[in-house]
Image (cartoon, helix red, strand yellow):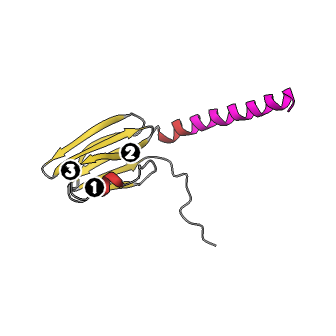
Amino acid sequence: MKKKDIIIIGSILAAAIGLYFILVSTMTAGARVKIMVDGEIYKETSLSKDQVIMVDNTYGVNVVSIESGEVRVTEADCRDHICVNHNAISKNNETIVCLPHKMVVEISGAEDNDVDAVVK
């Protein structure tokens, strides 16, 4: 490889990394996380702010973690732990549900970047 090739490859990589961080920061800037218990809003917060939220109610306790633009339930005292085993969510209208605790975690206001279906 020549010196010019290395410079070109380095420039392309730097531009790609910069573009990635710009897209990630704008994608989650207006996104909101809404935590509802029994149909009532328990807490609503920004997806871009890293935090841990303890959801303690008459049905049980859940721990919701927001980190790097993703939301996940990290702890729950329910029997099945389906909410804990659920993948992290980050896109508009994605949800995590804990049926025993009647809790729903939903994302709203994020951009829709993925194609759900293509119809011809």
Q: Residue at x 39, y 49 (%)?
A: 107
Residue 31 shows up from this direction: no
Residue that label 2 marks:
71
Which residue is situated farthest in the bottom direction here? 120
Q: Which residues are magenta?
A: 1-23
Callout 3: SS: loop
Residue 36 part of the magenta-drawn span:
no
Distance of label 3 from label 2 (alpha carbons): 18 Å
Q: Is residue 90 above or below residue 17?
A: below
Q: Which one is in front in this view, the residue at disc 1 or the one at disc 2?
A: 1
Q: Residue at x 28, y 55 (%)?
A: 81
Q: Is residue 1 above or below residue 56?
A: above
Residue type indicated by callout 2: Val
Residue 112 shows up from this direction: yes
Q: Residue at x 68, y 31 (%)?
A: 14
Distance of label 1 from label 2 (alpha carbons): 16 Å
Residue that label 1 marks:
81
Q: Residues within 10 Å of mark 3 (few under 14, many from 20)?
A: some
Which residue is situated farthest in the front direction here? 1
Point out residue 22 in the picture as x, y percentages from the top left corner.
58, 35
Depth order, front residue of 100/95? 100
Distance of label 1 from label 3 (alpha carbons): 8 Å
Residue that label 3 marks:
77
Q: Is residue 45 above or below residue 105?
A: above
Q: Main secondary structure of the magenta part?
A: helix
Point out residue 50 in the picture as x, y percentages from the top left corner.
38, 34
Q: Residue at x 85, y 26 (%)?
A: 3
Residue type indicated by callout 3: Asp
Q: Which one is in front in this view, the residue at disc 3 or the one at disc 2?
A: 3
